[in-house]
Structure formats: C-alpha cells, structure tokens
Image (cartoon, grey):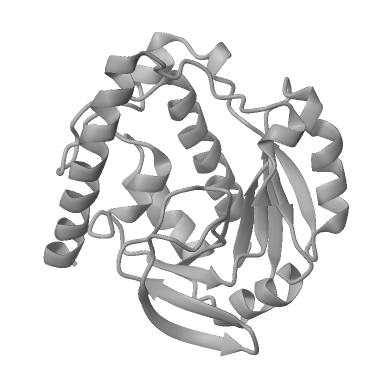
Amino acid sequence: MTVTAFIIHLERATKRGEHVRGLVERLPVKAEIVDAVDALEMGEGDIAAVYARSLHSPYYPFELRKSEVACFLSHRKAWAAIVDRKLDAGLIIEDDVEVDAGFAAQLQLAIDTLQPADYIRFPRWPRGEAGAEIARDGANSIMEPELPGLGMQMQLVGRDAAIALLAATERFDRPVDTTIQMRWLHPVRVLSARPITIREIDFDLGGSVVQGKNKTFAGRLKREILRPWYRVTLYLCNKVRR
C-alpha cells in the first residue's frame, strides 16, 4: 500500500517550522509538508464560494470563523493530494502534533485494516467514542465509533474516502470535524485507533494560530448551551439516517 503523510503547516507559523521538519523525519512513512490555507489571505468572496450557513440538518448553531473555513480548505487540499498522487492512502497531520513511542505499530495496524473508503482517526483523547472493535494486534486496536469524536489532529484517509469527502464538501456549513461526523452525508467508514499515541503540543509551539475566537461572556455562554444540544441532535441523526 502506498501511503504518504501530509503535514498541514501554516507558513507564517514559524515557531512550528522546526517541529514540523523534525516530524517529517520521525514518522514511519514518507512525509511532506502541505501549505495550509491562510485565513489572513482570504477575502469575503473566497469564503462565500465555499461556505454557506444551514446547508444541512441538523443545522450548525454557530457561524464559522474565517480560520475554521481556512482549516476546512486545508484538509480538502490534503484530500486532493491523495487523489492527485493516486495514493492508496494519506496520513493527514496537523502541525502541532507529536507522536509517541507506540505510534508506529498502531499505524501499521491501521494500514493493514484500511479499506479504500475508510477514514481512521488517531484521536488525542479517548473520551466520547464507543463502538465495536474491528481489528486488534496486541495492545493496539481499531474500533468503529457510533459517533466519531471531534478533532482533526491525525487521520489515515483511503483514496476512495478522499474522493467521497471532496465530493460531499464542495460547499460546507460547519467545521471539518463535525462534517465528518455526518455519516449520512458521505459513504466513508469512520474508524478510530486505540490506545492514544499522539499528543497536541500547540502550547509548546507558541500557542494556537486560530484567530477571532469569541471571548465574551455572552458568546461563551451561548456556546456552552448550544454545543450539548447540537451533539445530541447529531447523535440521533446518525442513528436514524445511517
């Protein structure tokens, strides 16, 4: 199986550059850097071409920040690289991720398990996912969660999965991770690896590069109220529509 790792890296995030270059050398598969889409270089027309509110139900209760649109487009860029290169799969990694000692063996199990239309998450935490185990090798396992967790730190994406996700997200109305959760929107089988073998180290690399977060009390309160409602609604939609 031909697998290449694509590390999504924002060029102006210079504090992350040394880490990314080291990660290229530490990964157990061939790796290269993909230039992330920069939110600061996006105009209103660029956003309107790909983003619209309330395209799909259940409706996402928050308007996307420009940085979230750029993040989505960066992952689409990595999916397109899988297809354009005619790879069997791509390992897509955000630039604030570090791998632990057990990662190589876990990745090998994921590669051995992967079907062309599969998408295997390497989450940074185990909470929020429950489902049937479909593969195991020693301490490592692959499971199929009833509702995939959030976060886009690392995923192994099969070629057919990349094709399907590109087709389903030419326009989008919510962040990329919760779009992946909408399994009636695409034919991709979403799996998850265990145990946890990656870490997010953004604070060690100068903090988040996401701009424009709503830090007002009213904004935070609104999100705290609507997030649980949205999660429950999404879970129920997955149960009904699959």
Q: Residue at x 67, y 36 (%)?
A: 202
Left or right of residue 57, residue 74 in this image: right
In the rendered image of this protein, does residue 43 appear above or below residue 149? above
Where residue 231 appears, x then y in whole percent?
24, 49
Where residue 75 appears, x then y in whole percent?
53, 42
Left or right of residue 86, residue 18 in this image: right
Residue 12 location, quadrant: top right
Residue 231 shows in the view = yes
Q: Residue at x 30, y 57 (%)?
A: 186
Question: Viewer-proximal residue, 9 or 19?
Answer: 19
Q: Residue at x 60, y 67 (%)?
A: 88
Question: Viewer-proximal residue, 130 or 163?
Answer: 130
Query: Residue placed farthest to the left in the image?
Result: 240
Where residue 153 appears, x then y in whole percent?
58, 49
In the rendered image of this protein, does residue 107 appear above or below residue 47? below
In the rendered image of this protein, does residue 126 appear above or below residue 34? below
Left or right of residue 39, residue 216 in this image: left
Residue 224 location, quadrant: top left
Where residue 233 appears, x then y in whole percent?
16, 50
Residue 86 shows in the view = no
Give the mark count. 0
State the quadrant of the C terminus: bottom left
Question: Viewer-proximal residue, 60 or 49?
Answer: 60
State the quadrant of the N terminus: bottom right
Q: Residue at x 19, y 52 (%)?
A: 232
